[in-house]
Image: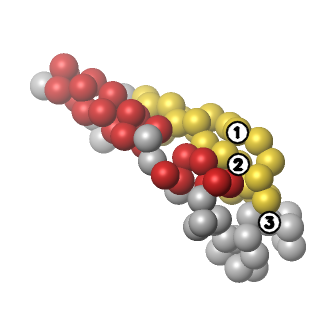
Amino acid sequence: DERMLKLRAKVLEEAAQLSEMRSWRESENVPICPDCKQALEFRVKGKRELQTQGGHRIELEREYGICPKCGQGFFPP
């Protein structure tokens, strides 16, 4: 079971890294601020750590954006 949980975590991490939203600056679907409804402006790439249901840590690299109106920062999905 433990080996399956580790494999599942690795597959999830790799699938997320291949996601279209990983590089949203080049996408037609630029994320928007949920409060202001403004398109986010790219700031930096950052890493985000998540934990799977099996307790394994996965690391995602995502582009981080800032809302030009309210200044909130987001890691889009």
**Residue at the extreme left of the image, as rendered:** 1
Q: Position of residue 12 (x, y in %)?
A: 34, 38
What is the spatial separation of the Cα atoms under label 3 and label 1, in whole angstroms? 16 Å
Q: Earlier in the sequence, mark 1 or mark 2?
A: 1
* Amino acid of disc 3: Cys
Residue 67 at what x, y percent from top left?
A: 79, 65
Type of amino acid under label 1: Lys
Per the rendering, the mark at residue 67 is 3
Secondary structure found at label 2: strand
In percent of the image, x 45 and y 48: which residue is there? Answer: 19
In percent of width and height, residue 27 lies at 60, 59
User: Residue visible at 86% across and 67% down?
Assistant: 68
Q: Is residue 28 left or right of residue 52?
A: right
Dot 2 amino acid type: Tyr
**Is 50 positioned to the left or the right of 6 in the image?**
right
Q: Residue at x 40, y 34 (%)?
A: 13
Q: Quadrant of the N terminus?
A: top left
